[in-house]
Image: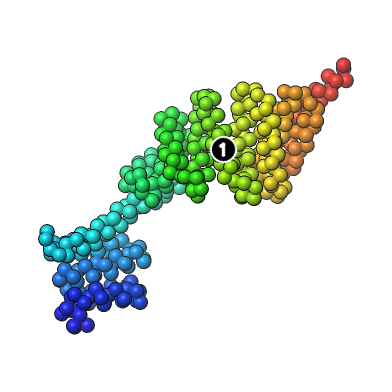
Amino acid sequence: MKQLHENPQTLGHFFEPLYKIRSGFAAVRVAKRVCKGSKNNKCNLAGGLRNRYIQHGGMSDLSESTELHQAALVLCPPGHPDRSTSLNGLANCLANRFKERAMSLNNLALSLRNSFQRRGMMSDLNEVIELHRAALLLRPPGHFHWFMSLNNLAISLTERFEQWGMPSDLDEAIDLHRAALALCLPGHFNQSLSLNNLADSVHSRFLQRGMLSDLDEVIELHRAALALHPPGHPEQSTSLNNLAKSIQDRFLQRGVLSDLDEAIELYRAALALHSPGHYLHSSFLNNLATSVHSRFLQQGVPSDLDEAIELHRAALELRPLGHSDRSMSLNNLGISLRDRFMQRTIAQSI
């Protein structure tokens, strides 16, 4: 060990295998005993601290490593043969610290978002948005986590829109979701998530402003998401239901029966993928029943009304006393039974 101390040039050769065969903590302890004040010693100790930071995530190690690289750089003025090595080591530490700040901002934002969801304080949500903005600034286009920052900021803005109804928040969220989707080339694992997020935001704008072009875009986005969820995919039923819902909304706006027919078929396909015990089964029964009842109101086919009644009965059975949607099922079934009574009364009088 004394020989290594007297000849700093050999330290790098010694510590490189040491970091590989011993824990980061042991390696750094040895380095601190051996290293004194030379540039080489500082660089080797800095490298050991950074390696330990990478293994264990201790910010104190990263801070100390950065200070050591800065001290080593002072010993390597312009023209020194090792200046580029010192610059590179310092740059790596600063890059790690830069990433840590962005991640810390993101983590703090997520904690505050949880607090907002528990307490409902708008000051928490406002701070969440500002933290996500700051994190996004630290992750420019091309950054590995740029997609995550775009998505997180967009979701937070959407939540504030839902609370305050400010159109500018929703417009910005849509722009951010578009930017996130643009990062997802065909086959990207986040593509369907981005399609659904953008569809949800554009649909919220349609509900607020009533622009049919927004609804048309929502339908196309849900079609694209469904194409990514072929038979057997765990998200296929959700995509079928989302597309059916948006097409049914368009029918309610334009009254085109082909839209209603397509929505019914999509609802049937979604329902077929769920067993009676599935937690969404009652919702899918209700969706199909509502759309079939709408077709009865348009075309007056008794079989549609009979089917709607049976579907509403099945949904009601899955919503016992105390269920949050039981009153809705009772109301829907009551309306359908009333319509059948009215239809048959009229038919008998004729």
- Disc 1, SS: helix
State the image coordinates of residue 154 (x, y, percent, origin top left).
43, 39
* Residue 138 at least partly seen: yes
Image vertical order of residue 123 relative to residue 85, above or below:
above
Q: How is the image coloured?
A: rainbow
Q: Is residue 180 left or right of residue 247?
A: left
344 lies above or below 233: above
- Report the residue at 42% width, 46% height from top: 147
Compared across the picture, whether 211 is left or right of 51 comes to right
Q: Which residue is mark 1?
A: 222
Percent coordinates x, y for residue 301 in the rendering: 79, 26
Left/right placement of residue 82 relative to residue 106 reads: left
Residue that sits furthest to the bottom in the current view: 2
Which image quadrant: the C terminus? top right
Numbered circles on residues, count: 1
Please name the residue shown 74% across and 42% down the image.
317
- Crowd band around label 1 with a 10 angstrom C-alpha radius: few (<14), some (14–19), many (20+): many
- Residue 210, image x and y in percent? 53, 24
In the rendered image, is residue 155 in sight?
no
Residue type for callout 1: His
Quadrant for the N terminus, please.
bottom left
Q: Where residue 307 appears, x then y in whole percent?
A: 78, 34
Q: Residue at x 43, y 29 (%)?
A: 167
Q: What residue is rendered at 45% in x and 35% in y?
A: 174
Residue closest to the eye, 78 or 126:
78
User: Relative to 103, is 194 above or below?
Assistant: above
